[in-house]
């Protein structure tokens, strides 16, 4: 062992050598490590530790642990905490009170008792109400409570534990969080819990099982009847209810050939006669429409027809793509329909499609791009269409000579790339789009592709103008407004300038760069947009007016406000929700009430409220040929338990009576960690809708929220 004295006194404020020494453990001159160095005060005797540390342990036969003193003895109070307590700042804070509601079957509540006092506890429990049975008594005594379900009661009433009854809440209703205990998703208790989430005004157990005056035997039957469970008997009930008022053709809409059954000879002859009549009808239609084309429309038609007369080759492979640019009412749809009639009269196949279902119904034999090319959802950079060259759809695409695709501005470039790859594969041709003639149409002043949480630059980058194929597209412009009325020319011109971005902005602050809108188009702050749009209209005229919103949340709230203005009784339809998985543990992670609270884009609400005479909108493509596609508006004529009887207000089936059943909807939302499956009517009130959903619609008065 050696002593080392001295050191550099200028470094920091180190102790002097007279105060400390450095002790190196080991033989003199032997190599040392950091573990061999010990700083030790001078004058203190050296201690040698040659064994483990010792501890005094007291063993008591009887444990008497004082948690409070133990906490105080072991607790360290830092300076910030001490200062906080000296100034008596709040240590804890509770913003909301959590109220837990128990669920139990009749005479099956939990009873706590001491050993030997079982009977006393049972007698006491028989005389006391639980929160659930007290809710039954409250509904019998207080009519105002009948408006609330079991889970809504704590927001308006307080449970008195002493008297076991609900009393009217005086304050704090907005500071309450209500939670009903979870149960296993099997058995009677689960079905009872489902009913308690929705039932209002129940006065007994029997009331929970009563539906439209019929007392059902089990809670499960009541859940199935109310649509809270996904059960196959729902289809049987729908058909049984529909056959009472609808003809078989209206219910099925099918023929024998749809089921590969033999067709009678008379029907074949009848179809052949109709086919010949259709060819002659196309010739007559083309001859009728050709003189009505203006100069710009005629230029587009002649260029497309000239390209069809040429065989695809290396020289013209890049001259078979056309784009017809034109604002609303410039005659794009009229041009499409003329080309369809012209192609049909020549015996040449053509196909028309649009990005939205509403725009597709305006075209003769139109379909959506997803339906025509089997585009996947969602569409990614490397997505492929679900069509093989030898499939029926692949053979049809190979036979088509002209494709007309509307709403070009809404088509993302990834979809265009997928269509290009598909046609090259189906036609076995490496020319752009397999050498087919393509006529695009649209207006880039209107809606662009949807990019979730995308910045403006990302939205522009997703447009087809940024695709490789756009460099070969020949552009034609339609400028004449075919539907503008007298006195509206200035407003139409102003809209074109607004879409083109040529209206000069303000120069002064704080509105620098903003565009001035005429006062007649602005609603004042103290005015209601619902009153402004629907206030002076009769109920029958509501279908011709709409309020557009950027988000679904705003449109849902506005629709509810307009529904309250309508006369009649509200009928409520509830959905059956679950996640798409067979793992029972995974389903338990997401309670039913949480799934009910979700309304993703494109999904109907869990609680669908309708009135006879209200205007609704389809959210799914049910029958595109019949005009029943996403965005079709209808007027409710009758509200049955299992289907909605409605009259179509738009499209080729305007005035036709149809019925809409419940269907299974599945939506994979990137914001959710699961796939939500919802069985509900695929409709939503149509007095307010998102701007994207309005594409292709026509209204007399429009408000923008």
Image (cartoon, rainbow, N blue to C red):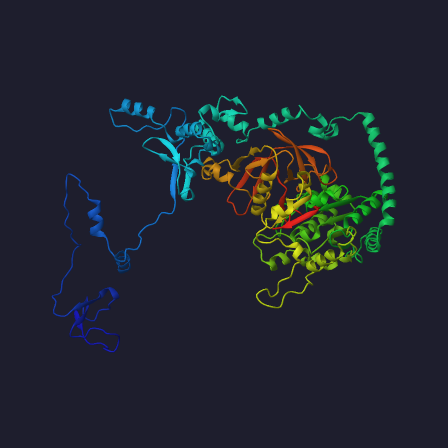
Viewer-side residue, 543 vs 467: 543
* Picture quadrant of residue 636: top right
**Position of 243 compared to 453: left or right?**
right
Q: Residue at x 24, y 24 (%)?
A: 116
Q: Is residue 605 above or below residue 482?
A: above
Residue 375: % across, % down: 66, 45
Q: Residue at x 14, y 50 (%)?
A: 56
Residue 152: % across, % down: 45, 36
Q: Can residue 494 be seen by looking at this rendering?
A: yes
In this figure, what is the number of numbered marks?
Answer: 0
**Position of 89 compared to 282: left or right?**
left
* Picture quadrant of residue 448: bottom right
Q: Can residue 375 be seen by looking at this rendering?
A: no
**Position of 685 compared to 626: left or right?**
left
Viewer-side residue, 49 vs 197: 197
Viewer-side residue, 358 vs 408: 358
Viewer-side residue, 30 vs 270: 270
Residue 279: % across, % down: 85, 39
Q: Is residue 27 above or below residue 485?
A: below
Position of the N terminus, as image quadrant, is bottom left
Residue 255: % across, % down: 74, 29
């Amino acid at each position: 062992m050696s002593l080392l004295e001295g050191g550099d006194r200028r470094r920091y404020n180190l102790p002097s050598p007279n105060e400390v020494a450095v002790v190196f453990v080991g033989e003199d001159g032997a190599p040392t490590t950091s573990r061999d160095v010990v700083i030790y005060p001078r004058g203190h005797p050296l201690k040698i530790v040659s064994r483990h540390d010792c501890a005094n342990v007291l063993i008591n036969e009887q444990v008497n642990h004082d948690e409070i003193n133990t906490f105080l003895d072991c607790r360290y109070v830092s300076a910030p905490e001490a200062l906080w307590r000296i100034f008596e700042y709040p240590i804890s804070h509770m913003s909301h009170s959590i109220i837990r509601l128990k669920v139990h079957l009749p005479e099956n509540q939990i009873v706590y008792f001491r050993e030997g006092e079982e009977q006393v506890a049972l007698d006491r429990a028989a005389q006391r109400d639980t929160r659930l049975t007290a809710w039954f008594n409250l509904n019998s005594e207080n009519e105002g409570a009948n408006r609330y379900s079991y889970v809504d009661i704590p927001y308006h009433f307080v449970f008195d534990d002493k008297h076991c009854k609900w009393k009217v809440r005086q304050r704090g209703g907005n500071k309450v969080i209500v939670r009903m205990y979870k149960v296993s998703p099997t058995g009677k208790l689960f079905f009872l819990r489902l009913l308690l989430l929705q039932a209002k005004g129940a006065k007994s157990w029997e009331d929970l099982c009563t539906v439209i005056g019929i007392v059902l035997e089990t809670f499960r039957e009541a859940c199935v009847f109310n649509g809270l469970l996904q059960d196959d008997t729902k289809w049987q009930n729908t058909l049984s209810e529909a056959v009472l008022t609808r003809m078989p053709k209206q219910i099925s809409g099918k023929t024998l050939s749809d089921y590969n059954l033999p067709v009678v000879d008379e029907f074949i002859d009848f179809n052949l006669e109709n086919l010949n009549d259709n060819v002659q009808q196309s010739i007559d239609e083309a001859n009728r429409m050709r003189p009505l084309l203006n100069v710009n429309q005629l230029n587009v038609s002649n260029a497309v027809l000239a390209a069809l007369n040429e065989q695809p080759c290396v020289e013209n492979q890049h001259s078979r793509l056309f784009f017809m640019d034109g604002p609303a009412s410039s005659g794009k749809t009229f041009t499409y329909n003329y080309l369809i009639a012209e192609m049909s009269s020549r015996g040449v196949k053509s196909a028309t499609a649009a990005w939205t279902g509403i725009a597709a119904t305006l075209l003769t034999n139109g379909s959506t791009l997803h339906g025509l090319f089997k585009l996947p959802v969602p569409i990614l950079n490397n997505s492929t269409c679900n069509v093989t060259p030898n499939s029926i759809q692949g053979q049809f695409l190979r036979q088509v000579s002209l494709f007309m695709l509307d709403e070009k501005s809404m088509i993302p470039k990834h979809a265009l790339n997928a269509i290009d790859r598909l046609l090259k594969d189906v036609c076995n041709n490496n020319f752009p789009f397999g050498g087919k003639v393509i006529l695009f149409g649209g207006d880039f002043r209107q809606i662009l592709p949807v990019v979730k949480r995308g910045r403006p630059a990302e939205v522009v980058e997703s447009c087809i103008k940024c695709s490789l194929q756009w460099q070969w597209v020949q552009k034609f412009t339609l400028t004449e407004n075919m539907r503008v009325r007298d006195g509206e020319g200035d407003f139409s011109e102003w809209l074109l300038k607004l879409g083109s971005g040529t209206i000069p902005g303000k120069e002064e602050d704080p509105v620098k760069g903003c565009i001035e809108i005429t006062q007649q188009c602005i609603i004042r702050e103290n005015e209601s947009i619902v009153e402004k749009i629907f206030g002076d209209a009769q109920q029958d005229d509501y279908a011709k007016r709409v309020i557009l919103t950027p988000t679904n949340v705003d449109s849902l709230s506005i629709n509810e406000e307009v529904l309250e203005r309508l006369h009649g009784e509200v009928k409520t339809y509830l959905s059956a929700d679950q996640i798409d998985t067979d793992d029972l543990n995974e389903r338990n992670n997401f309670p039913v009430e949480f799934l009910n609270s979700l309304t993703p884009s494109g999904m109907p609400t869990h609680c669908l409220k309708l009135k006879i005479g209200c205007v609704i909108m389809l959210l799914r493509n049910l029958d595109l040929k019949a005009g029943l596609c996403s965005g079709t508006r209808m007027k409710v004529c009758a509200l049955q338990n299992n289907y909605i009887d409605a009259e179509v207000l738009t499209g080729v089936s305007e005035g036709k009576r149809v019925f809409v059943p419940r269907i299974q909807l599945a939506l994979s939302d990137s914001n959710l960690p699961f796939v939500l499956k919802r069985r509900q009517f695929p409709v939503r009130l149509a007095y307010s809708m998102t701007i994207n959903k309005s594409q292709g619609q026509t209204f007399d008065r429009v408000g923008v929220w």
